[in-house]
């Protein structure tokens, strides 16, 4: 195949992916919370629909999430304006940020690459594999309830 054609296809695919990820989506937590002016520091960034019931693992994950993550990522992973992004957002869908991305972010921190909040430091309190798995289950169940899968 022609190298120029392959290069053009690669550029087109990257451009299409960039466009897709820049779209807010429609409804639920795939769209950012509506703003009627500048948002207040710490205001929720996404509208999150909470499922009527969580699995037992996700119920425990909510407890761990609240203790280790909510101070930055907000209640129900809705994000906080000026502080940290919503995890219930299609940027964090499993096909783009797999479960291991959450594990690595919690343990090692992560360099800013989607949002203008700066780098995320590692979570201050060490989390076990089981605690991280429960947190991920909680976030994934919130995501599914909001049409992110």
Image (spheres, grey):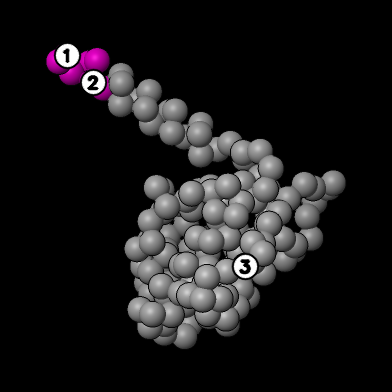
For the residue labelled by badge 1, is the local secondary structure a helix, a strand or a loop?
A: loop
Which residue is pictured at 63% across the width and 75% down the height?
71
Asked if disc 1 and disc 2 are in contact, CB closer than 8 Å, the reply is: yes
Q: Secondary structure at mark 2?
A: helix
- Depth check: 64 or 19 in front? 64
The residue labelled by disc 1 is: 2
Relative vertical location of residue 132 with respect to residue 93 in this rendering, above or below: below
Q: Is residue 3 magenta?
A: yes
On the rendered structure, is 1 left or right of 89? left
Q: Which picture quadrant has residue 72?
A: bottom right
Residue at image mark 2: 6
Say the numbered circle drawn on residue 94: none
Residue at position x 56%, y 76% in the image:
59
Q: Which residue is mark 3?
A: 53
Q: Residues within 10 Å of mark 2 (few under 14, many from 20)?
A: few
Observer able to see residue 97: yes
Residue 131, image x, y percentages: 43, 80
Q: Which one is nearer the viewer's eye here, 134 or 23?
A: 134
Q: CA distance from mark 3 to mark 1?
A: 53 Å
Answer few, some or many: residues within 10 Å of disc 1's Cα (few below 14, many 20 plus, some between 14 and 19): few
Disc nearest the viewer among 3 and 1 = 3
Q: Position of residue 89 (x, y in %)?
A: 57, 51
Q: Residue 102 in the image: x percent, y percent?
A: 42, 65
The answer to whether residue 139 is magenta is no
Q: CA distance from mark 1 to mark 2?
A: 6 Å
For the residues labelled 3 and 2, say whether their Cβ atoms are less than 8 Å apart. no
Q: Please state if 100 lies on the left or on the right of 78 as rendered.
A: left
Q: CA distance from mark 3 to mark 2?
A: 47 Å
Which secondary structure class fits the magenta region best?
Answer: helix
């Amino acid at each position: 195949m022609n190298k120029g054609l392959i290069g053009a296809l690669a550029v087109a695919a990257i451009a299409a992916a960039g466009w897709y990820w820049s779209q807010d989506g429609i409804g639920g937590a795939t769209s950012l919370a509506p703003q009627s002016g500048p948002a207040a520091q710490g205001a929720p960034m996404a509208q999150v629909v909470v499922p009527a019931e969580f699995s037992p693992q996700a119920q425990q994950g909510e407890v761990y999430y609240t203790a280790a993550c909510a101070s930055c990522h907000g209640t129900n992973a809705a994000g906080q304006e000026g502080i940290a992004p919503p995890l219930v957002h299609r940027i964090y869908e499993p096909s783009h940020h797999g479960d291991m991305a959450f594990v690595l972010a919690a343990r090692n921190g992560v360099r800013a690459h989607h949002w203008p909040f700066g780098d995320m430091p590692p979570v201050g309190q060490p989390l076990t594999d089981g605690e991280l798995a429960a947190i991920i289950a909680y976030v994934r169940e919130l995501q599914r309830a909001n049409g992110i899968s």
